[in-house]
Image (spheres, helix red, strand yellow):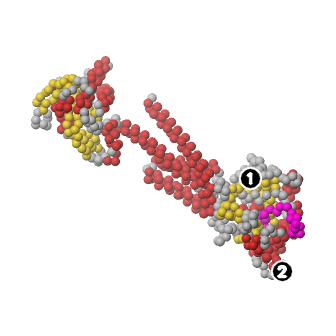
Amino acid sequence: MGKIFDRLKKGLLYIYTALVYLIIFLIVWFISYTFLFPNVYNFMLKAFSAMEYGNPDTVIVAIDDKSIDKVRWPWKREMYAKIMNYFSEYTDLKIIGLDTVVKGSDLQNPASDRAFYAAAAKLSDKLVTAFVPTIQDYPEDIDGPIYESYFNQRFKINIEDKRTRKAAPIYKSMAVFPTEYFFSVKNVGSSANGMHGVNKTFIKTYSLVNINGELYPSIALRMYLLTNDTDKITLYDNRIVVDKTGLKIPVTDRQVFTSNIHFYKYYPNSIYSHKQYSAIDIINSYDALKKDQQPVIDPSEFKDKTVFFGLNARGDVVGLEDSGMTPIGANHPGVDIQASIYDNLVNNQIIHRPHIFAEMLAALILSLITFIIVMNLTFGASLATIMGIIFGYILVNALILYPNNIAPDVITPVVVILATLIFGYAFRFILENKNKEKVKMAMGKYISQDIMQNVVKNIDDIRLGGRKAVVSVLFADIRGFTSMSEKMTAEEVSMILNEYFSAIEPIITKYNGVINKFIGDAVMAIFGDPIEDELHPMKAVLCANEMLKCVRKLRYKWMDENKPDIEIGIGINTGEVFVGNIGSEKRLEYTVIGDTVNIASRIESYNKVYKTKFLIGSTTYEFVKNRVDVIKIGGVTIRGKQNKMDIYEILRVNAGD
């Protein structure tokens, strides 16, 4: 029953530990994933993923500070018309994306509007313009269903939906456009181009937006489809596939079709990762070409180029700085982000993020490996191994995964490993303490608990040697043991001895005695060390007296059980001894050595000679003579001693204070 109870306790301990471990793992993982991962992810993207500039065939035209300094804002739309005419009349570009939303008509400058619409119409086959989805309803003066029906007829793409689960739309309407502008263009794309993370950093892009159940591509996806002469895509639960090219766009959110962006590094002394031209230089170049003059920018620079046009002026005019925080910059121009998203599709460089549950499982596996290492290796070996795992994991991410657009969580597994390291050593400390207690209990059955405590107390100072001390040594021997054992089996002898020793051990402990050793059927006990007790001679006598009473009771019990009738003889002597460790450096024994020990043994042996049960030496008698009734046995010869000595038979121990 005891073993079953111990196993049950051990099992409950492991179950409790597993639950605590799981709770700690989940807490640590959640905190790290929520608060540490975003910043580390941004750092890893900047340091190990954004290693090259944007595609040289993708360029940017921006209304920048230089443009605003030359022509005061707001610009008339005829300025945009000049830019479009420059590209349609003088360049052989591949496609242009207008990353700005044209809302309403310029009622004060209708001629400027007409010039803009006409320019858009000339560039229409290569122009993709933007609209903005919103979560608000259409204004009262707009008939939403009719407007969307017209929009779908003109701009809807061919989508085959093979999703097993579909999400509800989050957008209710589109931004309002001037009708003339719609008539002048052929292609539109959503400019809802991203979302913010926990740290408000722009890291994702929308490939599709869902407006009242209809799906529309982003500007970048629309431009990619046009450059590949297709409008056919297929939707799956976790990806978008462009049928003609086979491009697979991973989807991280089925409701808003987001994907992680691969960013590119900035050009030197620039805030753009693509080659950038000032809008005013394009306008001036157009005006110069019209006059047959040398342009600021030669149109040949745009041959077969993809152009993104947008706002990014940082002057005092509100609303002109279209930028956001990304992993590579605090004020990354939005038009450059759009160009990066397009390059992701063209170069198939989309960042692949493992599923959150896969990352959690990976962190859990690394945590379990860490725990196993901690529990099975030494401190130095386990620490070195775990540090090697951490650095190896970081290096694999930095040198292999992130450069190849695979971006797992780097920091959370590391934090989990370190937390597991602490937990593992805490658990190991508790377990080792429990094991030490078990060892102490087990060893206490071979040597005295008090000696054991003394050894543990001085664990770092165990060596050969010791000190002198005055103690009382007690020897107790079973009379006629040899002849008795010849008549009994070894098992029967063992049972009697075990019962005898089990009965007298508590008595010796009760009187601050320490069992030094069992010598066959004999017991050697020490009083006065390692348990200091000034009354050790009296305690030894009292102990012996109680031992004799105990054996008397055992004799009656054994007689009823038809077991041999045994008696014991006890001898006590008090004097100076050497107390400490003897043996070798590899095998020690804590014991006492000296004449006092030898004399105690000889005194006990005289019980056989004088047919007595309890004898003490003269030094012990001097300490206890006021508490005992004795018969003096004078002139006893002790082997090894020249002078004879007196010994005393204890007849009665008188009650004292």
x and y percent of residue 512 in the render?
29, 33
Does residue 51 appear anywhere in the picture? yes
Left/right placement of residue 316 relative to residue 370 reads right
Residue named by callout 2: 291
Residue located at (71% from left, 51% from top): 253
Q: Nearer the viewer, residue 584 or 515?
A: 515
Q: Name the spot of residue 146 as percent of width and height, x first.
A: 88, 53
Query: Which residue is the extreme one toward the top?
Result: 560
The residue carrying mark 1 is 256
Asked whether disc 1 touches disc 2, contact meaning CB atoms under 8 Å apart, the reply is: no
Crowdedness near tag 2: few (<14), some (14–19) or many (≥20) residues, C-alpha within 10 Å = few
Q: In this view, does 223 lie above or below 488?
A: below
* Amino acid carrying mark 1 in the image: Val
Magenta residues? Answer: 94-114
Residue at 78% in and 79% down: 295
Q: Is residue 570 magenta?
A: no
Tell me where residue 75 appears, x and y as whole percent: 81, 69
In the displayed image of the protein, which residue is found farthest to the front? Answer: 316
Q: Which residue is at 53% across, 55% downward? A: 390
Quarter assignment of residue 496: top left
Of the image marks 1 and 2, the number of the one nearer the N terminus:
1
In the image, what residue type sits under mark 2?
Answer: Lys
Element under disc 1: loop
640 w.r.t. 214: above or below: above
Q: Is residue 59 visible to the viewer in this orientation of the structure?
A: no
Q: In this view, does 456 lie above or below 88?
A: above
Observer-nearest of 562 and 76: 76
Nearer to the camera, 98 or 476: 98
